[in-house]
Amino acid sequence: MQDAPLSRRVLLTSVASALGVHALHKAGLAQAPGQPRVPTVPPDPTKVPGAPLSELGRRSPFERPRRIAIGGAQGSSFAPLQDLCGIVTPADLHFERHHAGVPAIDPHRYKLLIHGMVERPTVFDLADLRRFPSVSHLYFLECSGNGGVSYGGARPDLSPQAIDGLTSTSEWTGVPLATLFREVGVKTGAKWLLAEGEDAAVMARSIPVDKAWDDALIAYGQNGEAVRPEQGYPVRLVLPGWEGNANVKWLRRIELADKPFMTREETSKYTDPLADGTARMFSFAMDAKSIITFPAYPVILPDRGWWEISGIAWSGRGRISRVDVSTDAGRRWAPADLQAPVLPKCHTRFRYLWNWDGTETTILSRAVDETGYVQPTLDQLRKARGVGTYYHFNHIREWRVRKDGAVMFGGEG
Protein backbone atom coordinates (compact mmCIF):
# COMPACT_ATOMS: atom_id res chain seq x y z
CA MET A 1 0.00 0.00 0.00
CA GLN A 2 1.32 3.45 -0.88
CA ASP A 3 2.32 5.65 2.02
CA ALA A 4 0.14 8.67 2.71
CA PRO A 5 1.67 12.06 1.85
CA LEU A 6 3.66 13.62 4.67
CA SER A 7 3.95 17.36 5.06
CA ARG A 8 7.33 18.99 5.63
CA ARG A 9 6.13 20.46 8.95
CA VAL A 10 5.01 17.06 10.23
CA LEU A 11 8.30 15.53 9.10
CA LEU A 12 10.47 18.12 10.83
CA THR A 13 8.40 17.93 14.01
CA SER A 14 8.57 14.15 14.14
CA VAL A 15 12.32 14.12 13.43
CA ALA A 16 13.03 16.71 16.12
CA SER A 17 10.97 14.93 18.76
CA ALA A 18 12.36 11.53 17.86
CA LEU A 19 16.00 12.56 17.98
CA GLY A 20 16.44 14.67 21.10
CA VAL A 21 19.83 15.85 22.27
CA HIS A 22 21.37 12.41 22.81
CA ALA A 23 20.14 11.13 19.46
CA LEU A 24 21.50 14.20 17.71
CA HIS A 25 24.96 13.24 18.88
CA LYS A 26 24.29 9.64 17.94
CA ALA A 27 23.13 10.65 14.48
CA GLY A 28 26.22 12.73 13.81
CA LEU A 29 24.19 15.93 13.50
CA ALA A 30 25.70 17.62 16.52
CA GLN A 31 29.26 18.21 17.64
CA ALA A 32 31.70 15.81 16.01
CA PRO A 33 33.48 13.20 18.17
CA GLY A 34 36.80 14.33 19.56
CA GLN A 35 35.98 18.05 19.55
CA PRO A 36 36.14 20.05 22.82
CA ARG A 37 33.04 20.24 24.94
CA VAL A 38 30.97 23.37 24.49
CA PRO A 39 31.09 25.96 27.28
CA THR A 40 28.58 25.82 30.11
CA VAL A 41 25.49 27.90 29.42
CA PRO A 42 22.88 29.19 31.87
CA PRO A 43 19.77 27.00 32.24
CA ASP A 44 17.51 30.00 31.60
CA PRO A 45 18.98 32.64 29.26
CA THR A 46 16.07 34.99 30.05
CA LYS A 47 17.48 35.48 33.59
CA VAL A 48 21.06 36.42 32.61
CA PRO A 49 22.22 39.34 30.41
CA GLY A 50 23.69 38.17 27.13
CA ALA A 51 27.08 38.85 25.60
CA PRO A 52 27.92 42.46 24.70
CA LEU A 53 28.39 43.89 21.23
CA SER A 54 31.55 42.92 19.36
CA GLU A 55 33.50 44.09 16.34
CA LEU A 56 33.55 40.66 14.75
CA GLY A 57 30.80 38.07 14.80
CA ARG A 58 31.48 34.45 15.68
CA ARG A 59 29.71 31.12 15.52
CA SER A 60 27.77 29.67 18.39
CA PRO A 61 30.08 27.51 20.55
CA PHE A 62 27.66 24.66 19.82
CA GLU A 63 28.61 24.81 16.12
CA ARG A 64 32.14 23.70 15.29
CA PRO A 65 32.45 22.95 11.56
CA ARG A 66 36.05 22.44 10.51
CA ARG A 67 37.96 21.76 7.33
CA ILE A 68 40.16 18.65 7.16
CA ALA A 69 43.68 19.84 6.32
CA ILE A 70 46.10 17.42 4.65
CA GLY A 71 49.67 18.51 3.98
CA GLY A 72 51.31 21.82 4.76
CA ALA A 73 52.40 24.48 2.27
CA GLN A 74 51.60 21.98 -0.47
CA GLY A 75 48.30 20.30 0.31
CA SER A 76 44.55 20.56 0.55
CA SER A 77 41.83 21.23 3.08
CA PHE A 78 38.39 19.71 2.62
CA ALA A 79 35.13 21.61 3.18
CA PRO A 80 32.68 20.01 5.68
CA LEU A 81 29.92 19.29 3.14
CA GLN A 82 27.81 17.36 5.65
CA ASP A 83 27.70 20.34 8.03
CA LEU A 84 26.56 22.97 5.54
CA CYS A 85 23.09 24.33 4.78
CA GLY A 86 21.88 25.55 1.40
CA ILE A 87 24.53 26.04 -1.27
CA VAL A 88 26.87 28.83 -0.13
CA THR A 89 30.06 27.80 1.64
CA PRO A 90 31.21 30.18 4.40
CA ALA A 91 34.48 31.77 3.28
CA ASP A 92 36.44 30.32 6.20
CA LEU A 93 35.24 26.81 5.31
CA HIS A 94 35.85 27.05 1.55
CA PHE A 95 38.16 24.24 0.43
CA GLU A 96 41.84 24.97 -0.18
CA ARG A 97 44.47 23.63 -2.57
CA HIS A 98 47.95 25.13 -2.50
CA HIS A 99 51.18 24.27 -4.28
CA ALA A 100 53.51 26.51 -2.26
CA GLY A 101 51.54 27.92 0.65
CA VAL A 102 49.53 31.12 0.97
CA PRO A 103 51.51 34.22 -0.05
CA ALA A 104 51.24 37.47 1.89
CA ILE A 105 50.48 40.23 -0.63
CA ASP A 106 50.14 43.92 0.20
CA PRO A 107 47.01 45.17 -1.63
CA HIS A 108 48.53 48.67 -1.87
CA ARG A 109 51.42 47.27 -3.91
CA TYR A 110 49.35 44.83 -5.96
CA LYS A 111 49.67 45.00 -9.77
CA LEU A 112 48.06 43.05 -12.62
CA LEU A 113 49.85 43.16 -15.98
CA ILE A 114 47.96 42.37 -19.21
CA HIS A 115 50.26 42.19 -22.23
CA GLY A 116 51.21 40.10 -25.26
CA MET A 117 48.87 40.26 -28.25
CA VAL A 118 47.11 43.44 -27.16
CA GLU A 119 47.04 46.98 -28.54
CA ARG A 120 47.72 48.66 -25.19
CA PRO A 121 49.73 46.66 -22.63
CA THR A 122 48.47 47.86 -19.26
CA VAL A 123 49.26 47.51 -15.57
CA PHE A 124 46.22 47.70 -13.27
CA ASP A 125 46.36 48.20 -9.53
CA LEU A 126 43.57 47.16 -7.17
CA ALA A 127 41.99 50.62 -7.23
CA ASP A 128 41.93 50.52 -11.04
CA LEU A 129 40.10 47.19 -11.03
CA ARG A 130 37.54 48.47 -8.52
CA ARG A 131 36.74 51.46 -10.74
CA PHE A 132 35.29 49.23 -13.46
CA PRO A 133 31.62 48.20 -13.26
CA SER A 134 31.44 45.12 -11.04
CA VAL A 135 29.28 41.98 -11.12
CA SER A 136 28.50 39.32 -8.51
CA HIS A 137 27.67 35.70 -9.25
CA LEU A 138 27.34 32.44 -7.33
CA TYR A 139 29.71 29.83 -8.78
CA PHE A 140 31.17 26.58 -7.51
CA LEU A 141 34.86 25.79 -7.59
CA GLU A 142 36.11 22.22 -7.59
CA CYS A 143 39.58 20.73 -7.55
CA SER A 144 39.92 18.41 -10.53
CA GLY A 145 41.27 15.75 -8.15
CA ASN A 146 38.15 15.89 -5.98
CA GLY A 147 36.78 12.42 -5.26
CA GLY A 148 40.04 10.65 -6.04
CA VAL A 149 40.23 9.30 -2.48
CA SER A 150 37.45 6.86 -3.36
CA TYR A 151 38.48 5.94 -6.92
CA GLY A 152 40.62 2.97 -6.03
CA GLY A 153 38.72 1.65 -3.03
CA ALA A 154 35.76 1.94 -0.73
CA ARG A 155 36.77 2.49 2.89
CA PRO A 156 33.50 2.52 4.84
CA ASP A 157 34.58 5.27 7.27
CA LEU A 158 34.71 8.10 4.73
CA SER A 159 32.45 11.12 5.20
CA PRO A 160 31.14 13.37 2.40
CA GLN A 161 33.85 15.81 3.47
CA ALA A 162 36.61 13.22 3.05
CA ILE A 163 35.26 12.04 -0.31
CA ASP A 164 34.21 15.21 -2.12
CA GLY A 165 35.18 18.10 0.16
CA LEU A 166 37.32 19.80 -2.49
CA THR A 167 34.36 21.76 -3.83
CA SER A 168 32.67 24.92 -2.56
CA THR A 169 30.29 27.63 -3.74
CA SER A 170 30.81 31.33 -3.11
CA GLU A 171 29.39 34.59 -4.35
CA TRP A 172 32.27 36.07 -6.34
CA THR A 173 32.46 39.81 -7.01
CA GLY A 174 34.75 41.53 -9.48
CA VAL A 175 35.18 42.83 -13.00
CA PRO A 176 34.51 40.63 -16.06
CA LEU A 177 37.77 39.79 -17.82
CA ALA A 178 36.04 40.75 -21.08
CA THR A 179 35.85 44.34 -19.78
CA LEU A 180 39.61 44.44 -19.28
CA PHE A 181 40.16 42.87 -22.68
CA ARG A 182 38.22 45.67 -24.30
CA GLU A 183 40.28 48.15 -22.31
CA VAL A 184 43.62 46.78 -23.54
CA GLY A 185 42.43 45.94 -27.07
CA VAL A 186 42.98 42.21 -27.55
CA LYS A 187 44.22 41.49 -31.07
CA THR A 188 42.19 39.30 -33.43
CA GLY A 189 44.75 36.51 -33.64
CA ALA A 190 44.91 35.99 -29.88
CA LYS A 191 43.46 32.55 -29.05
CA TRP A 192 44.99 31.74 -25.66
CA LEU A 193 45.92 33.58 -22.49
CA LEU A 194 48.42 32.72 -19.80
CA ALA A 195 47.17 33.32 -16.25
CA GLU A 196 50.05 33.51 -13.78
CA GLY A 197 49.90 33.64 -9.99
CA GLU A 198 52.09 35.44 -7.47
CA ASP A 199 52.63 32.49 -5.14
CA ALA A 200 55.99 30.78 -4.70
CA ALA A 201 54.92 28.07 -7.16
CA VAL A 202 54.26 30.76 -9.80
CA MET A 203 51.20 28.79 -10.82
CA ALA A 204 50.41 29.33 -14.51
CA ARG A 205 47.76 27.92 -16.84
CA SER A 206 46.83 28.38 -20.50
CA ILE A 207 43.20 29.40 -20.98
CA PRO A 208 41.26 29.74 -24.26
CA VAL A 209 40.44 33.38 -24.97
CA ASP A 210 36.82 32.40 -25.71
CA LYS A 211 36.33 31.62 -22.02
CA ALA A 212 37.52 35.10 -21.09
CA TRP A 213 35.02 36.70 -23.45
CA ASP A 214 32.27 34.45 -22.08
CA ASP A 215 32.11 34.53 -18.26
CA ALA A 216 35.62 34.74 -16.76
CA LEU A 217 35.85 37.03 -13.76
CA ILE A 218 38.71 38.92 -12.11
CA ALA A 219 37.43 38.57 -8.54
CA TYR A 220 38.37 40.66 -5.52
CA GLY A 221 35.27 39.86 -3.44
CA GLN A 222 33.94 36.66 -1.89
CA ASN A 223 30.67 36.30 0.01
CA GLY A 224 30.37 40.02 0.65
CA GLU A 225 33.95 40.68 1.78
CA ALA A 226 37.43 40.73 0.28
CA VAL A 227 38.63 37.42 -1.11
CA ARG A 228 40.27 35.42 1.69
CA PRO A 229 44.09 35.06 1.46
CA GLU A 230 43.87 31.29 0.92
CA GLN A 231 41.40 31.95 -1.90
CA GLY A 232 43.66 34.37 -3.75
CA TYR A 233 43.70 37.75 -1.98
CA PRO A 234 43.74 40.38 -3.26
CA VAL A 235 42.70 39.17 -6.75
CA ARG A 236 42.03 35.80 -8.34
CA LEU A 237 40.77 34.45 -11.64
CA VAL A 238 37.36 32.75 -11.61
CA LEU A 239 36.50 30.53 -14.57
CA PRO A 240 32.94 29.35 -13.87
CA GLY A 241 32.52 25.58 -14.16
CA TRP A 242 36.18 24.88 -14.95
CA GLU A 243 38.64 22.85 -12.91
CA GLY A 244 39.97 24.64 -9.86
CA ASN A 245 43.62 24.68 -10.89
CA ALA A 246 42.82 26.87 -13.91
CA ASN A 247 41.17 29.45 -11.61
CA VAL A 248 44.57 30.96 -10.81
CA LYS A 249 44.84 32.61 -7.39
CA TRP A 250 46.91 35.67 -6.48
CA LEU A 251 46.72 36.63 -10.15
CA ARG A 252 49.54 38.94 -11.26
CA ARG A 253 49.92 38.53 -15.04
CA ILE A 254 47.86 37.75 -18.13
CA GLU A 255 49.64 37.27 -21.45
CA LEU A 256 47.78 36.89 -24.75
CA ALA A 257 49.13 34.62 -27.52
CA ASP A 258 48.02 32.59 -30.53
CA LYS A 259 48.73 29.17 -28.97
CA PRO A 260 48.81 27.53 -25.52
CA PHE A 261 51.89 28.07 -23.38
CA MET A 262 52.31 24.40 -22.35
CA THR A 263 53.18 25.11 -18.73
CA ARG A 264 54.22 22.40 -16.30
CA GLU A 265 50.70 22.44 -14.81
CA GLU A 266 49.18 21.31 -18.12
CA THR A 267 51.86 18.88 -19.27
CA SER A 268 53.26 16.97 -16.29
CA LYS A 269 50.10 17.67 -14.28
CA TYR A 270 46.36 18.18 -14.88
CA THR A 271 46.36 15.96 -17.96
CA ASP A 272 44.22 12.83 -18.17
CA PRO A 273 45.94 9.64 -19.41
CA LEU A 274 43.45 7.51 -21.33
CA ALA A 275 43.16 3.74 -21.70
CA ASP A 276 44.43 3.78 -25.31
CA GLY A 277 47.74 5.37 -24.33
CA THR A 278 46.83 8.89 -25.38
CA ALA A 279 46.20 11.82 -23.04
CA ARG A 280 43.33 14.26 -22.73
CA MET A 281 44.70 17.77 -22.29
CA PHE A 282 42.86 20.97 -21.40
CA SER A 283 39.94 19.06 -19.90
CA PHE A 284 38.64 22.19 -18.25
CA ALA A 285 34.91 21.65 -17.69
CA MET A 286 33.79 19.78 -14.60
CA ASP A 287 31.11 17.23 -15.49
CA ALA A 288 27.79 16.77 -13.68
CA LYS A 289 28.13 15.28 -10.23
CA SER A 290 26.22 14.78 -6.98
CA ILE A 291 26.72 13.45 -3.49
CA ILE A 292 24.29 12.70 -0.67
CA THR A 293 25.41 14.58 2.44
CA PHE A 294 22.65 13.23 4.74
CA PRO A 295 22.36 10.48 5.76
CA ALA A 296 26.04 9.68 5.35
CA TYR A 297 28.94 8.52 7.52
CA PRO A 298 29.21 8.97 10.51
CA VAL A 299 25.44 9.34 10.90
CA ILE A 300 23.49 6.68 12.80
CA LEU A 301 19.76 6.84 12.15
CA PRO A 302 18.17 6.21 15.58
CA ASP A 303 14.76 5.18 14.26
CA ARG A 304 13.08 3.82 11.19
CA GLY A 305 10.48 6.02 9.50
CA TRP A 306 10.57 9.22 7.51
CA TRP A 307 13.93 10.86 6.79
CA GLU A 308 14.89 13.54 4.31
CA ILE A 309 17.78 12.54 2.08
CA SER A 310 19.72 15.67 1.16
CA GLY A 311 22.78 16.51 -0.89
CA ILE A 312 24.32 18.76 -3.49
CA ALA A 313 24.70 18.47 -7.24
CA TRP A 314 26.63 20.61 -9.70
CA SER A 315 27.81 20.81 -13.30
CA GLY A 316 30.42 22.92 -15.02
CA ARG A 317 28.34 22.92 -18.20
CA GLY A 318 25.27 24.72 -16.87
CA ARG A 319 22.30 24.09 -14.60
CA ILE A 320 21.35 20.86 -12.90
CA SER A 321 18.07 19.81 -14.50
CA ARG A 322 17.36 16.71 -12.38
CA VAL A 323 18.73 14.60 -9.55
CA ASP A 324 17.50 11.04 -9.21
CA VAL A 325 17.69 9.16 -5.92
CA SER A 326 17.64 5.42 -5.38
CA THR A 327 16.97 3.83 -1.99
CA ASP A 328 17.33 0.23 -3.20
CA ALA A 329 20.89 0.06 -4.57
CA GLY A 330 19.98 1.46 -7.99
CA ARG A 331 17.15 -0.89 -8.95
CA ARG A 332 14.66 1.99 -9.01
CA TRP A 333 15.17 5.73 -9.27
CA ALA A 334 12.89 8.65 -8.39
CA PRO A 335 13.38 12.39 -8.98
CA ALA A 336 14.38 14.49 -5.99
CA ASP A 337 13.17 18.01 -5.32
CA LEU A 338 15.61 20.73 -6.35
CA GLN A 339 15.77 23.55 -3.83
CA ALA A 340 15.77 27.07 -5.31
CA PRO A 341 17.83 28.77 -6.52
CA VAL A 342 18.94 26.45 -9.31
CA LEU A 343 21.75 28.39 -10.97
CA PRO A 344 24.22 27.53 -13.74
CA LYS A 345 27.67 26.35 -12.67
CA CYS A 346 26.64 26.45 -9.03
CA HIS A 347 25.90 23.93 -6.31
CA THR A 348 22.23 22.90 -6.23
CA ARG A 349 20.65 21.45 -3.10
CA PHE A 350 18.41 18.42 -3.63
CA ARG A 351 15.99 16.74 -1.18
CA TYR A 352 14.08 13.47 -1.17
CA LEU A 353 11.65 12.08 1.45
CA TRP A 354 12.44 8.48 2.34
CA ASN A 355 10.48 6.14 4.56
CA TRP A 356 13.12 3.78 5.92
CA ASP A 357 11.66 0.43 6.96
CA GLY A 358 14.68 -0.60 9.03
CA THR A 359 16.14 -3.05 6.53
CA GLU A 360 19.68 -2.87 5.17
CA THR A 361 19.87 -0.97 1.91
CA THR A 362 22.00 1.29 -0.27
CA ILE A 363 21.13 4.87 -1.23
CA LEU A 364 22.54 6.71 -4.24
CA SER A 365 22.10 9.95 -6.15
CA ARG A 366 22.54 10.63 -9.88
CA ALA A 367 22.75 14.13 -11.38
CA VAL A 368 21.61 15.18 -14.85
CA ASP A 369 22.52 18.60 -16.24
CA GLU A 370 20.79 20.78 -18.83
CA THR A 371 22.94 19.36 -21.65
CA GLY A 372 21.42 15.91 -20.98
CA TYR A 373 24.65 14.54 -19.50
CA VAL A 374 24.02 11.85 -16.84
CA GLN A 375 26.39 11.25 -13.95
CA PRO A 376 28.10 7.92 -14.73
CA THR A 377 28.68 4.79 -12.70
CA LEU A 378 32.22 3.84 -11.79
CA ASP A 379 32.32 1.23 -14.56
CA GLN A 380 31.18 3.76 -17.13
CA LEU A 381 33.81 6.25 -16.00
CA ARG A 382 36.59 3.68 -16.14
CA LYS A 383 35.59 2.59 -19.63
CA ALA A 384 35.78 6.19 -20.80
CA ARG A 385 38.89 7.31 -18.88
CA GLY A 386 40.77 4.14 -17.90
CA VAL A 387 42.18 3.50 -14.45
CA GLY A 388 45.29 5.70 -14.57
CA THR A 389 43.64 9.09 -14.28
CA TYR A 390 44.14 11.41 -11.31
CA TYR A 391 41.41 13.88 -12.22
CA HIS A 392 37.69 14.41 -12.88
CA PHE A 393 36.12 11.78 -10.63
CA ASN A 394 32.38 12.41 -11.06
CA HIS A 395 31.04 8.87 -10.67
CA ILE A 396 28.04 7.93 -8.50
CA ARG A 397 28.65 7.41 -4.76
CA GLU A 398 26.95 4.79 -2.57
CA TRP A 399 25.90 4.98 1.08
CA ARG A 400 25.05 1.70 2.81
CA VAL A 401 22.48 1.87 5.58
CA ARG A 402 22.79 -1.00 8.04
CA LYS A 403 19.98 -2.48 10.14
CA ASP A 404 21.29 -0.67 13.22
CA GLY A 405 20.99 2.65 11.37
CA ALA A 406 24.72 3.18 10.84
CA VAL A 407 25.49 4.72 7.46
CA MET A 408 28.79 3.78 5.82
CA PHE A 409 30.44 4.74 2.57
CA GLY A 410 29.87 1.96 0.09
CA GLY A 411 32.07 3.11 -2.78
CA GLU A 412 30.78 3.98 -6.19
CA GLY A 413 27.65 2.88 -8.00
Image (tube, helix red, strand yellow):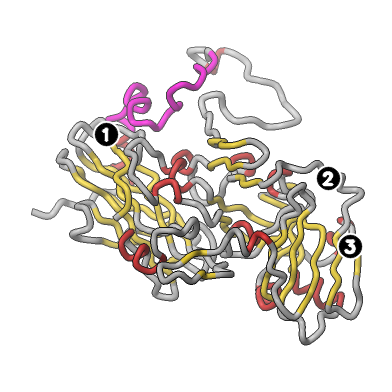
Q: Nearer the viewer, residue 247 or 303?
A: 247
- On whether residue 29 falls in the magenta region, the answer is yes
x and y, in percent, of residue 411 in the image:
32, 48
Q: What span is in magenta? A: 16-39
Earlier-in-chain disc, 1 versus 3: 3
**Mark 3 sits on what residue?**
124
Q: Quadrant of residue 133?
A: bottom right
Three-letter residue code for mark 3:
Phe
Task: Give the structural element (helix, strand or loop) at label 2.
Answer: loop
Asked if disc 1 and disc 3 are in contact, CB closer than 8 Å, the reply is no
**Mark 1 sits on what residue?**
406
Q: What label does residue 34 carry, if any?
A: none
x and y, in percent, of residue 136 in the image:
68, 61
**Mark 2 sits on what residue?**
105
The answer, for residue 220, to whether it is visible in the render is no
Which residue lies at the image location 76% right of the left edge and 65% below the top edge? 175
